[in-house]
Amino acid sequence: MDSSIRLKFTTGKYLSLKKKKIGYIILIIIGVIAILGFALSSPIAQDEAYHNFSDTLTIGGIPNFWNVVSNFPFLMVGLYGLFQIRRINKVNLQFLAFYIGISFVSIGSAYYHYSPTTNTLVWDRLPMTIVFTAFISIVISELINDKKGKVLLFPLVALGIVSILYWVFTGDLRIYALVQFYPILAIPVILVLFKTERNSTTGYWLLLVFYLVAKLFEMYDFEIQNHLKFMSGHSLKHVAASVGIYFFAKSWKAIPDK
């Protein structure tokens, strides 16, 4: 091997290892801060005002019509994702959990928005925790360590389910907040500081961007409803999140057999 090529290879490998080390440190710091925040903060109760959405339109006997029917894209992209799994040579439980979770989000969220209460909100959030936890395990497998990501799938999904049960029985949302927001902070760090040799990270970034757009739509629910008249911000939130998932599913390439 030519000395210049060898030097370039060695330098690139050193920089890659250095970036990974920085990445691990940042992930640990975020995790410690999140756990300390949980331990030191007061219990977080569900705000009953959360259920007051701008969409109150009834069409065809369906109350809150657009908030209900805008969940249909979740079912479509969930089924599309399951169909796309055929492009992965081996059965992958992480993707099955992710796309099945998304499909059930469409049902749980539609049920909740049909009659928005804290009791029905459980069925909206339960499949979402499966989606969040399965997705972080996919990211770990793809960019950090394939085996570790797969091993972590069931513990992470179990943590998500526990966060819902904990909320149901104690009224405290702190664990659920941890499950939802830690991945949002951790995934960009992983995408920047770790490297995938199998797939482009474009699909991951698009999913994150559309998720953030969805959160903005959610935040400005009433303002968007007042401006558009026919559609609320929360309804558009569902559509934007579905679009992000579609781009992620479409971007995934088959993993070649070793």
Image (cartoon, helix red, strand yellow):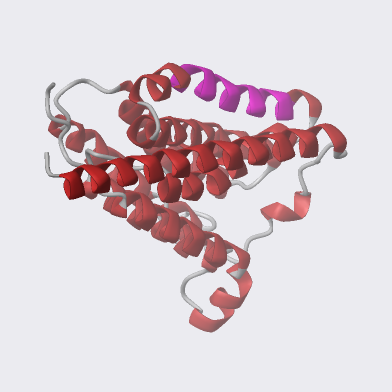
Considering the whole magenta stretch, tell me its main secondary structure.
Answer: helix
Most extreme residue toward the bottom, as rendered? 227
List x then y, in percent, for residue 71: 42, 50
List x then y, in percent, for residue 26: 59, 42
Q: Residue at x 47, y 71 (%)?
A: 231
Q: Residue at x 55, y 32 (%)?
A: 126
Relative to 187, is 33 on the left or the right? right
List x then y, in percent, for residue 225: 55, 74
Most extreme residue toward the front, as rendered? 3
* 159 drawn magenta: yes
Front in this rendered view, residue 46 or 23: 23
List x then y, in percent, for residue 47: 78, 49
Location of the C terminus (image quadrant): top left
Total numbered labels placed on residues in the image: 0
Relative to 225, is 253 on the left or the right? left
Res 52 quadrant in image: bottom right
Front in this rendered view, residue 12 or 89: 12
Q: Which residues are magenta?
A: 153-168
Q: Residue at x 55, y 39 (%)?
A: 124
Location of the N terminus (image quadrant): top left
Relative to 3, is 215 on the left or the right? right
Res 166 quadrant in image: top right
